Amino acid sequence: MANNYFVLLYLFLLSSFSVIAQNKAVFSDKKPLIDTTVKAKGLFGGRLDTGLEKQMDQVKKLKSESAEWKKESKAFLDEMGLNNLGSKTAKLAKNIKKKIVLKDEYEGIKTERRLGEYGSGNRLTYEEINVVKYVEDEAVSPYNQEIWWFDPSQRRIVNSSLKDNKSAQICHGPFKRFVNQVLVEQGFFYMGAKDGRWENYGPEFELENKQYFKRGFHSESTITYHDDDKKKIKEIIPRVYGKVTGQYLCFFPNGLIKEEGKLDDSVKIGRWREFHEKGTGGRLKKEWRLGKDKFDQQEGILIQERDTQSKIIYQNPQKFD
């Protein structure tokens, strides 16, 4: 009996010490030992794993490789003498843009703007014109038979003779013509001659015609010269869209015209004239009248012929318009 009592007492005391030890472990104010040499990964010191940690490591690796590549690229550009290439390119682009937007010059020649106005009602016409600003720049080519200039008295551009006309202002640069507030024609002039692309539009702003010029002549034209420097023109054979069509011109070495006339698909049409190289009172040598177009089979008719003193050698008795 006594033995049973001692066994029960022992079991009771053992159970009590166990409960005390558990409570002490739960409410202990001592912090567990942590290895602070390794930084925990993930949220809340690694206690919450999101699965993004590996991706973040890859991003950091790519950033490191990119920085290293930029460093090597800069060293290579410096070695090639191309340092600050980006800023230089940006500066160059800015300068190009600045040159493009200039409106007071064309082909390096200073210009001034003029506004033309004539007509009335639904035929009221406005012209936006640019003219050569300085008189010393007015070097009109002797080879151009058609020179356009602004006439202040008429407030419009004309292509009549420049001889002894002190009010003539040579067209040079962009040109636009509006009829009843609708754009009908636009292009460029170079010292009074058509240059670059010229376009004509209908009443609904539909493109009706487009031509390209080079200093007064169709850009496709065949031009030959008397000299190797290509300054003295000998002959101009007009070509438009591959066909020999337009104004034909032939010159003497001194720049004076030798022969002129129109071609329609390689066929001479209209009025043709030949000239003497030198003459007193005029240089006209012969004048011919031909068909109206390439389909007109009319044989050429000599209208008149003159000598170097401008004396008429032959005059056709027929009357021509």
Image (cartoon, grey):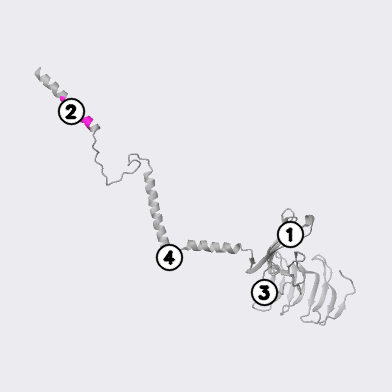
- Residue 32 sits in quarter: top left
The residue that disc 3 covers is 136
Q: Position of residue 316 (x, y in %)?
A: 88, 75
Q: Is residue 23 above or below residue 267?
A: above
* Disc 1 secondary structure class: strand
Crowding around mark 2 (Cα neighbors within 10 Å: few <14, some 14 to 19, many 20+) is few
Residue toward you, 295 or 293: 293
> What is the CA distance from the residue labelled 3 to the residue labelled 4?
48 Å
> What is the CA distance from the residue labelled 1 to the residue labelled 2?
113 Å
- Circles 3 and 1: CB distance less than 8 Å? no
Which mark is first along the chain, 4 or 2?
2
Q: Which mark is residue 126?
A: 1
Residue toward you, 185 or 303: 185
Which mark is first along the chain, 4 or 1?
4
> What is the CA distance from the residue labelled 1 to the residue labelled 4?
57 Å
Residue for point 18% across, 28% down = 17
* Disc 2 secondary structure class: helix
> What is the CA distance from the residue labelled 3 to the residue labelled 2?
119 Å
- Residue 295 sits in quarter: bottom right
What secondary structure prevails in the magenta region?
A: helix
Amino acid type, label 3 = Glu
> What is the CA distance from the residue labelled 2 to the residue labelled 4?
79 Å
Crowding around mark 4 (Cα neighbors within 10 Å: few <14, some 14 to 19, many 20+) is few
The residue that disc 2 covers is 17
Residue toward you, 168 or 298: 168
